[in-house]
Image (spheres, rainbow, N blue to C red):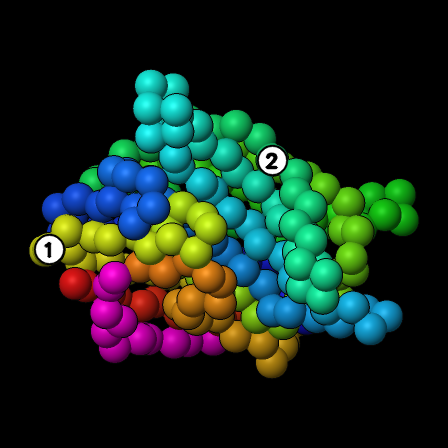
Amino acid sequence: MLTAGYLQIGFSTFSGESDSSVGSNDWSIQLNTNEFTVGGTQYWVQYVEQNYPTYFTFFGYATLCIWQVDVTTQSYPNSCVSTSIQTLSTSASPNITGYLSTSGGTNYLNTEYCENGTTCWAVKATDTNGLTGRWSDATGTILGEGGGSTADFTHPTSETTEIVALASSSFSGHSENTVTTAEMNNLNLGTVSFSCNSDSCTTSSPSSD
C-alpha cells in the first residue's frame, strides 16, 4: 500500500490556458487516489490545488484542499487553506504531495502544494474514511478548475506530468497520468515512461495540443 504520492507539472512550451466554464488562467492540479470501499460505502481522496483568478472578477482565489469524497452518496467534505493565485509559464513547476501520517493512534491525511519549489502551503485532516492501508494508486494532472470543466490550452503547448507513488516497502500499485474526475484538459497524451524501484514508481507523461 502507498504512503505518499507526488505530482509535478512542467511546460516546455506554453501559449496560454482558459477554463471552459470560468475563464483565463483558471485550472486545478489534482493528485487522486484509487477508490476504496469500507463498510459497503465507496470513497476516494483528492489532493487538489485550485486556481481561480476570475472569481468575482476583481478578487479571485486559490485553495489547496483535501477532498474526502463519499462516492456512494456523492458527498464532498473537504479541508482547505488559501494559497496565492498563480500564473502558468515555462518557468513554472507547481507540485503537489499527498501523504499519510499517524499520531497518537489517529491516522491523518496530509497535503503540501509548492509554487515553483519556493513558497509552499499545507493541509492536514483526520483520515475519516480509512484511506490508510487502502491506498494503491496515484493518478492526476492539470485539469479544469472544477464542476466538470476543461482546461483549454492554447496552441502550441507542451506539458509533462510526473507522478511518483511511494510505499514503505515493495508494492503493486502504480502511478499514471489519467483523468479519473469529471474535469478534463484538451491536451493529447504522448508516449509515457514508467519505472519502479523497491519502494516507488515514477510515471512521466508528456502531453501537447
- The disc, 1 or 2, on the residue closer to the chain's N-terminal end is 2
Is 168 a magenta residue? no
Report the residue that reaches farthest toward the right: 105
Q: Which residue is mark 2?
A: 80
* Quarter of image, res 46: bottom right
Q: State whether residue 43 appears in this view.
A: no
Identify the element where label 1 is drawn.
loop
Is 188 a magenta residue? yes
- Magenta extent: 186-196
In this view, the residue in front, 13 or 78, is: 78
Identify the element where label 2 is drawn.
strand
Q: State whether residue 129 appears in this view.
A: yes
Q: Position of residue 204 (x, y in %)?
A: 34, 67
In this view, the residue in front, 176 or 16, is: 16
Report the residue that reaches farthest toward the left: 156
> Which residue is rendered at x = 33% and y = 19% of the image?
58
* Numbered circle sitting on residue 155: 1
Against 173, residue 71 (above or below) is above
Quadrant for the N terminus in the image:
bottom right
Q: Is residue 129 left or right of residue 156?
A: right
In this view, the residue in front, 185 or 115, is: 185
Look at label 1 and name its amino acid: His
Q: Residues within 10 Å of mark 2 (few under 14, many from 20)?
A: some
Q: Is residue 86 left or right of residue 62?
A: left
In this view, the residue in front, 27 or 108, is: 27
Look at label 2 and name its amino acid: Cys
Mark 1 to mark 2: distance in Å?
A: 33 Å
